[in-house]
Image: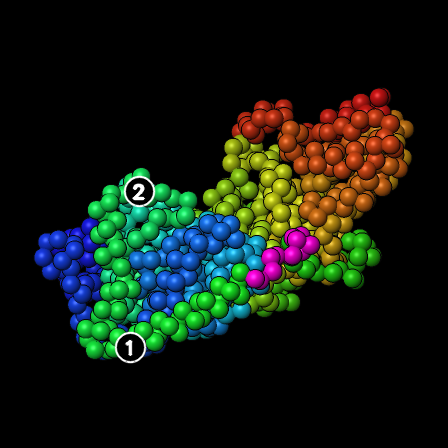
Amino acid sequence: MRPCMASWQTAVLEKTVTRGRVTLRLWLTVQHGLRCNTMKQKTATLEVPSERYPGHEQVYRLMYLGRLLDEEAPNFLRKNMGWSYHAPCAGHDAIQVALGCTFRQGKDYLFPYYRDLVTSLAAGLTAKEIILNGLSREEDVAGKGRHMSNHFAKPAINIQNVSSCVSNHAQHAAGVARAAKYYKSDAIAYASFGESSSSEGYVFEAINGSSREKLPVVFVMQDNGYGIGVPKREQSANEILAENYRGIGNLHIEICDGRDVFACFRSMQAAVDFVSAGEGCAIVYAMCARIGPHSNSDNHTLYRSEKELEEAKKRDPLPIFRNFLLKEKLATESQLKEIEADAEKEFNAAVEYGSAAPIADISTVEDHLLPPAYPCTENPEGIPASDTGEVCTLRQGINQALKTEFRRNPDTFMWGQDMASGEKEGIFKVSDGMQHEFGNKRVFNAPIAENYIVGTANGFSRFDQKIRVVVEAAEFADYVWPAMDQIIELSHEYWRTYGQFSPNVILRLASGGNIGGGLYHSQNLEAIFTSIPGLRVVTPCYADDAAGLMRTAMRSQGAILYLEPKAMYNHPFTRCKVAEDFVVPFGKARLRKEGNDISIITYGSGVMWSMKAAEMAEKENISVEVLDVRSLNPLDTGAIVKSACKTSRALVVHEDKVFSGFGGEIVAQIMHECFEYLDAPVERVGQKYIPVPFNKTLEAAMQPNEKIVFDAVKKVLAY
């Protein structure tokens, strides 16, 4: 029988349907009569519905206290005190209290979404902490007011600080569950979100990947019939969106009445039992009522009728549960009044405290942008101390550093596409020999799903700060776009949590052209990545720098974009001796050639063209200085300024497009710091402002080379 769309229920009380390896269980309320407002609550038994059920009194208290907080948020907004974003949770109370009580503080990992007020309260946040978050105060345990209100978190007990990018935390839940499985923990990851955000591709990627790997993840989908103002019939052909996932193996699906406390606890318990047995992941799909608007900025009367709003109020879980307790003689009126009075006392104290709490300290706004980097005290300049070590190409230098760091730290992992397919081991062989030496539990293939690759790295690193994850974020840098939201997540996790969580992830990307790859195989992305606060971005040219930067990255905290100029992987120009423990500090440029007449500031492939152009210039008695910045963010502005002031003329060279390329930032730094020392305008060399063509002749016509660099040198000197 199909569910009644108006009342979010079905005529089936309990039913188990098994189709192959997929289990669908229905724990829904019986409907009596044809009209939704004649619905009558009925529960199969009065037995404890879950081993994590805390008792009727505590459940009712949490729901009642949550409702007080939910209704107070708009009052703070009207008084212009804060809570400028609030998504009411009324109508979701039953599934949220079940989810929050099922979560084990400090053991499991909870990824709530912006409507999960009661979830967070039941999971361990206090009323005071809820209000401090809503008012963005200094004492907000989520991150001292740095994130939006209604983004509830308490990292100290594993309630995760998630983003406003709805449901992309499903990937993080999958990642931390992968780590729990690897380290043989009994922890469970819970990812909660609205039913409509399950239309997002990254939700499918998370469920698909978690089911394949049999990861202990419970995805809780709260269905209130709308995605903001869009009815769910415009989201999916299935009225129950969990049905969209029915064909996936190793997946247990629970569908419950999200207004029935007992049904919700039973479904949560069934999901926990399934994932704890190592059978796979689970979905708990709860039919809720949306009593209020999507948020304080949403006027739902523009798309919902008065009748619908009245019917929604009749499906309110709080009075339903209260009446149930009285009817079944599980509590008396006086007992419930006492519970309510106690909750009101806590609520009033929280309001008083939060209203007087200090606002965030503006002097700290730049704190915790980047987590600590490895100090490189043994080599603070990032220059080899001696001419020792094995001669390597750029590719071999990266490979050497990966292997030595994997031997040094057993809590290192690497995954990506085509990383460990027999003897293939990466399309460019950068990971050559890695799986053979370290096994397929530490080095393994990922699905062709860039968001899943990067998102699970974020989640995996949450399990323990000693973990370092290296991912080939995409086989070619140009294919990384589906993971961009996850890269943004990585960039502000440390800042957003006020230093409580650092995603220790190195994202390797083969970037650049000159291989005849054309579109999606030849672009340079550094100008985009360096514009994102919270990311470190490096790009080496020589083998020793490649090894040194990778080694430093794997010993540091935080998210690091490691851009590898793919045309240089096996180029003889990159060959040099690489000492086994060589490290290169972030933000430290390397002077590749001293000169007096002009400074070339460059990186990546540009180093080769610049060095060859300098040789051409020497034949005409022109002394060229070449500075390889190596690290784009942080940038060694001091070395750039020193060189430009010394020669009084500067040329910036990179492979990327001149227009909007990263070279523009270098020029701006030079002009700001060296203007009085300059004898000519700063010139730039880079690609023409067009996509990289596939035809090699066309590609060569739009790319820089040593001849173009040499001509630019003469142009600057002729000024």
Tag 2: residue type? Thr
Q: Nearer the viewer, residue 398 or 346?
A: 346
Residue with the mark numbered 2: 301
Residue with the mark numbered 1: 334
Counting the numbered discs, the total is 2
Front tag of 1 and 2? 1
Label 1, secondary structure: give it.
helix
Q: Residue at x 53, y 60 (%)?
A: 355
Label 1 Cα neighbours within 10 Å, binned few <14 / some 14-19 / many ≥20: few
Say which quadrant the C terminus sits in. top right
* Residue 492: image location, x then y, percent: 57, 52
Q: Residue at x 74, y 44 (%)?
A: 629
Q: Residue at x 51, y 36 (%)?
A: 520
Question: Is 361 within the magenta?
Answer: yes
| Image quadrant in which you'd find residue 340 | bottom left
* Residue 539: image location, x then y, percent: 67, 45
**Compared with residue 433, is residue 660 higher up or lower down, i.e. above or below?**
above
Identify the magenta region. Answer: 356-368
Q: Is residue 710 left or right of residue 277?
A: right
Q: Nearer the viewer, residue 23 or 189?
A: 189
